[in-house]
Amino acid sequence: MSNLFNLPFSFSTNPQTFKNLLQYRINIQLNSNEDKWSEKAIKGLIKRLTKASMIDDLQTALATRNPQTRCVTIPRLKINS
């Protein structure tokens, strides 16, 4: 089964969730370089948070705007030397 980012997790099978995360961008003009960069950044964020099983925590924190939600940390990428 093909999904949005070819990742094996439920978030990617729902393109509406990706669109929901896009709505939290501020002051971005459509079809601009910033728009394209922000979409790429959100895709990267989803990929990194999925590996850490924190994507649901991010969605909850953004949707509720409650400071009592779990902390969402973005894991660093490992650089192979």
Image: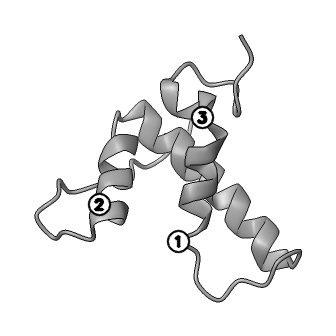
Whichever of labels 3 and 2 marks the residue nearer the N terminus, that label is 3
Counting every numbered tag in the picture gives 3
Give the residue number, with chain letter if any, for mark 3.
14
Taking depth in this image into account, of 60 and 49 the one nearest to the observer is 60
The nearer-to-camera label among 3 and 2 is 3
Q: CA distance from mark 3 to mark 2?
A: 19 Å
Whichever of labels 1 and 2 marks the residue nearer the N terminus, that label is 1
Taking depth in this image into account, of 11 and 47 the one nearest to the observer is 11
Q: Report the residue at 61% width, 49% height from top.
A: 18
- Secondary structure type for disc 3: loop
Give the residue number, with chain letter if any, for mark 2.
61
- For disc 1, the neighbor class at 10 Å (few under 14, some 14 to 19, many from 20) is few
Labels 3 and 2 touching (C-beta < 8 A): no
Q: CA distance from mark 1 to mark 2?
A: 12 Å
Look at the picture and state if 3 lies above or below 24.
Answer: above
Q: Amino acid at mark 3?
A: Asn
Whichever of labels 1 and 3 marks the residue nearer the N terminus, that label is 3
Look at the picture and state if 21 lies above or below 12.
Answer: below
Labels 1 and 3 touching (C-beta < 8 A): no
Q: Amino acid at mark 2?
A: Ala
- Secondary structure type for disc 1: loop
Give the residue number, with chain letter if any, for mark 1.
24
